[in-house]
Image: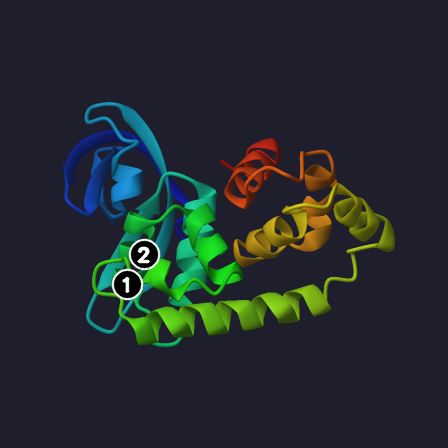
Amino acid sequence: MLYSVRGKLIHTAPGSAVVECGGVGFHCQTTFNTLRTLSPGSEVMLYTCLNVREDAMELFGFATKTELDTFKSLISVSGVGPKAGLAVLSELSPEQVAMAIATDDIKTITRAQGVGKKIAQRIVLELKDKLAKAAATDNGFSAVGAGAAAAAGGNVPKAIEALGVLGYAPSDVSGVLAELDGSLPVEQLIALTLKQMGRR
């Protein structure tokens, strides 16, 4: 419903930011990572997600589209609510979340406040399962794209899997990754790919 809000940042508090747009202040719950990028009094734009419950309407705002997409993926997991999604993204960057899921690193996810082992296991299992289904139906991942990615070698296959967690089909990213140095750390490959694709 609300894609984004742009305006003057008039107030911040731990876990929230208020953006004034056309005289109306939009209270956005957000992550500490997003808050670190905001300067009070400056013009900001936050990508938003509106969560409608029986007893409340909550607006969530994020500095990047990638962070928003990762938040949506996290709250799609059964038993993971917006509070847990914000906690994970306050502790980890989207790239770190993707890496943790791609490498079954449950311990890293449990660093988020209030996220225990069971929730972390569910996040990894369900999002890996969705990733596998998406890859199976990605008809656009041509043999040429697959060959180019494989030829780049090193950490490229891991980066493709991690980017899948962030919502990217292999066909979207294999061409970019094929041009990068496959020996770079996976997290750096992810960051460079996102930057090149203009999503950061």
Q: Is residue 143 above or below residue 27?
A: below
Coordinates of residue 140 in the picture (x, y in percent): 78, 56
For this view, does 64 lie left or right of residue 152? Answer: left
Q: Amino acid at mark 2?
A: Val
As helix, strand or loop, the secondary structure at mark 1 comes to helix
The residue that disc 2 covers is 88
Residue shown at 78%/62% (left/top)? 139
* Residue 197 drawn at (x, y percent): 61, 36
Which is nearer the eye, 48 or 93? 93
Rounded to the nearest angstrom, the CA distance separating label 1 from label 2 is 6 Å
Q: Is residue 168 visible?
A: no
Q: Residue at x 67, y 52 (%)?
A: 157
Instruction: Give the residue at x 49% y 53%.
Output: 99
Q: How many marks?
A: 2
Which kind of residue does numbered mark 1 sit on? Answer: Ala
Q: Tag 1: Cα neighbours inside 10 Å, few (<14), some, or many (≥20)? A: many
In the image, taking residue 138 as reference, residue 110 lies left or right, namely left
Task: Answer yes or no: is residue 6 visible.
Answer: yes
